[in-house]
């Protein structure tokens, strides 16, 4: 008698047992089924960082986001003029990346120390918006 014939008329299970013949019953469900129940040790051992939050985000009210511009961009923005108003263009802070060869008078709210050094080395100056301080 073949195996197929042997299991053909076995009560309700056909020789498979009660759960083995029903979809994903023998493997305990599909995908991540039971990961907090009968597969919890698998989760703890093999997936320790799979759930939960990682890292942190500061509250948006505490974040300071500047719209910035580098010293290297100033000559192209000046269009042949001797002065440039960055706050009028919507730029909050001037950063010191790049080179500048032209003497410019820049009006901006905030600037880095390196940007101030490079502009003064080129013969220019930076004016602040609020208190009209000059950096030379």
Image: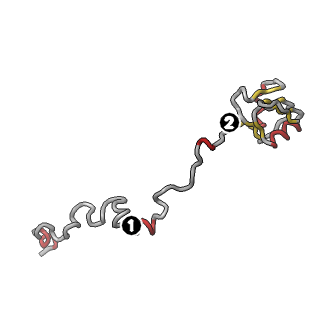
Regarding mark 1 in the picture, which secondary structure is present there? helix
**Distance between mark 2 and mark 1 Cα atoms:** 48 Å
Residue 132, quarter of the rendered image? top right
Give the structural element (helix, strand or loop) at label 2. Answer: loop
Viewport quadrant of the N terminus: bottom left
Residue carrying label 2: 67
**Which residue sits at x=69%, y=29%?**
90
Foreground residue among 76 and 89: 89
Q: Quick one: 2 or 12, which is closer to the camera?
A: 12
On the image, which quarter does residue 43 sit in?
bottom left
Left or right side of 34 for 92: right
Quarter that holds the C terminus: top right
Is residue 1 at all visible to an observer of this figure?
yes
Q: Residue at x 34, y 62 (%)?
A: 34
Residue 75 visible in this rendered orientation of the protein: no
Vertical comparison of 4 with 94: above or below? below
Residue 5 sits in quarter? bottom left
Residue 40, label in figure: 1
Give the percent coordinates (x, y) of residue 52: 48, 57
């Amino acid at each position: 008698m073949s195996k197929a014939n042997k299991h053909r008329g076995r009560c309700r299970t056909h020789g498979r047992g009660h759960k083995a013949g029903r979809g994903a019953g023998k493997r305990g469900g599909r995908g991540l089924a039971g990961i907090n129940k009968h597969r919890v040790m698998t989760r703890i051992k093999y997936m320790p960082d799979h759930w939960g939050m990682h890292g942190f985000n500061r509250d948006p009210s505490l974040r300071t986001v500047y719209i910035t511009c580098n010293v290297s961009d100033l000559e192209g923005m000046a269009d042949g003029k001797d002065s440039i108003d960055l706050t009028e263009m919507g730029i909050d802070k001037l950063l010191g990346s790049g080179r500048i060869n032209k003497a410019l008078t820049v009006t901006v709210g905030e600037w880095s120390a390196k940007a101030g050094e490079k502009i003064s080395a080129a013969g220019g100056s930076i004016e602040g918006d609020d208190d009209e301080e000059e950096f030379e």
